[in-house]
Amino acid sequence: MITGATVLALIGMLTAKPVLAQIRAALVANVDEPGRTPYQGVVVVTTDTCCYSLAPVPSGRRLVITNVTGSVNLDAPGFLTSVSLANQQTGAQVSIATTVTGAFAGQSSFSVSAPIQFVADGSQTLQMSISALSAATPSVGIFALSGYLLDCGVASCVPVVTEIVR
């Protein structure tokens, strides 16, 4: 004897989509997800050099810098005049605000913590510049630039338009 429940189960088996098709449809990758390819560059300040170049952005990628943090100590009466990040190929540049955090043991301490939005495409190089008024002895510090890389081979990256107004 065939019951109503048996008929419904049979109809369900005949009309249901295969489970594999349902699973396959759920496997989608968000190629623009910032957490997929995180980036962190570190600039170590150990001399009185002003400019530090990071490694070129890998070909076929776009680097998006979203934050700069760090600190630098200068021999008193040192004063940090500017911190900036520039794209050496396009000339785009952003200045990063610094904060005086104190003075101790004959040194002045300055810190940086700035959310930014700065972009560089494949083969371009970013350069961090640090300018200070200080005594002859070198400054010491460390900066971290964080963000993410986009794969322009999977989803094309529209060229960044850089307009410099003079």
Image (tube, rainbow, N blue to C red):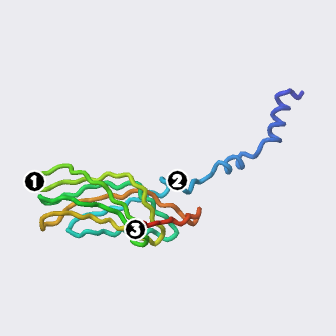
Question: Which residue of the protein is positioned furthest toward the left in this rendering?
Answer: 106
Of the pair 59 and 72, the residue shown nearer to us: 72
Q: Residue at x 15, y 59 (%)?
A: 78
Label 1 vs label 2: CA separation? 45 Å
- List x then y, in percent, for residue 123: 46, 72
Q: Can you identify the residue that label 3 sits on? A: 166
Q: Earlier in the sequence, mark 1 or mark 2?
A: 2
Callout 2: helix, strand or loop? Answer: loop
109 displayed left or right of 85 = left
User: Which quadrant of the figure contains the C terminus?
Assistant: bottom left
Callout 3: helix, strand or loop? Answer: loop
Amino acid beneath label 1:
Ala
Label 2 vs label 3: CA separation? 36 Å
Cβ–Cβ below 8 Å for labels 1 and 3?
Answer: no
Specify the label residue 159 is tagged with.
Answer: none
Callout 1: helix, strand or loop? Answer: loop
Specify the label residue 33 is tagged with.
Answer: 2
Cβ–Cβ below 8 Å for labels 2 and 3?
Answer: no
Amino acid beneath label 2:
Glu
- List x then y, in percent, for residue 163: 46, 66
Residue 14, compared with residue 70, is above or below; it is above
Of the pair 91 and 46, the residue shown nearer to us: 91
Amino acid beneath label 3:
Arg
Q: Nearer the viewer, mark 1 or mark 3?
A: 3
Q: Earlier in the sequence, mark 2 or mark 3?
A: 2
Residue 38, compared with residue 60, is above or below; it is above
Q: Can you identify the residue that label 1 sits on? A: 105
Residue 51, compared with residue 34, is above or below; it is below
43 displayed left or right of 150 = left
- List x then y, in percent, for residue 23: 67, 47
> Local crowd at mark 3 within 10 Å, few (<14), some, or many (≥20)?
few
